[in-house]
Image: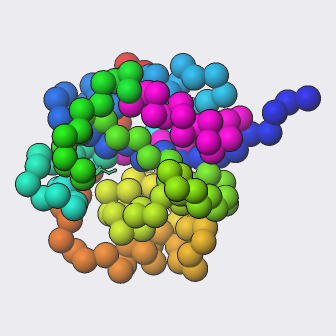
Amino acid sequence: MDKQTSSVYLGLGTNLGDRESNLRQAIQRLEQINGIDLQEISDLYETSPVGYLNQPPFYNMVVRIITTLSPRSLLEQVLEVEKELKRVRTVRFGPRNIDIDILLYEERLVDEVDLKIPHPRMVERGFVLIPLLEIAGDLWIPGTNKTITEWLKQLPPTQKIKRLNKKFLLLKQI
Ligand code: GSY
């Protein structure tokens, strides 16, 4: 019998080195994993840093995958990809060459010490919500009573988010 598949959204971010190449490599590695099928990718967005402000701008994007992996196994695989890409991060919330977050896993709520789904800070982050809206439509965020656009309306207008219309560059080489 086929294993059950789940639809999952991942957020990717990078602000060190060749940001386009970091994202491309991360997507390529994710695609090579047994039990992960890449379905959709958002455009690239150049975004001003949130949290620790004194760092270079990020490239952010969101992808949708179909997976047979459990949330826990998916987390292990994602951490492995970050390790393979030799993730560099010296300061918490500081610059990093790649960051991959599990944002949504179907409608599931997971609340474990090292794994929380939906990602707990995603609703405060325009750099997640805007690319998510692009590929997911205006869905409800599980565990909250609001949709993506309702969360977006609550955000302070301080974060700069520029759509780059560069998705084709990533797709050409994936
Ligand atoms: O997991 C998020 C890493 N991160 C980012 C990011 O990806 N983009 C922007 N714009 N700011 C950020 N601050 C942190 S931490």
Tell me how the rendering is colored. Answer: rainbow
- Residue 153 in view here: yes
- Residue 162 in view here: no
Name the residue: 60% across, 71% down: 143
Residue 127, above or below 36: below
Q: Nearer the viewer, residue 118 or 162?
A: 118
- From the image, which quarter does the N terminus lie in? top right
In percent of width and height, residue 9 lies at 53, 48
Is residue 8 inside the magenta stretch?
A: no
Is residue 63 inside the magenta stretch?
A: yes
Q: Is residue 165 left or right of residue 100?
A: left
Quadrant assignment, res 24: top left
- From the image, which quarter does the C terminus lie in? top left
Q: Is residue 42 left or right of residue 160?
A: right
- For the record, the magenta segment spans 61-82
Name the residue: 30% across, 24% down: 86
Q: Is residue 63 left or right of residue 173?
A: right
Q: Nearer the viewer, residue 63 or 53?
A: 53
Residue 70, above or below 51: above
Quadrant assignment, res 121: bottom left
Quadrant assignment, res 152: bottom left
In percent of width and height, residue 42 lies at 42, 44
* Farthest front residue in view: 113
Name the residue: 56% across, 75% down: 144
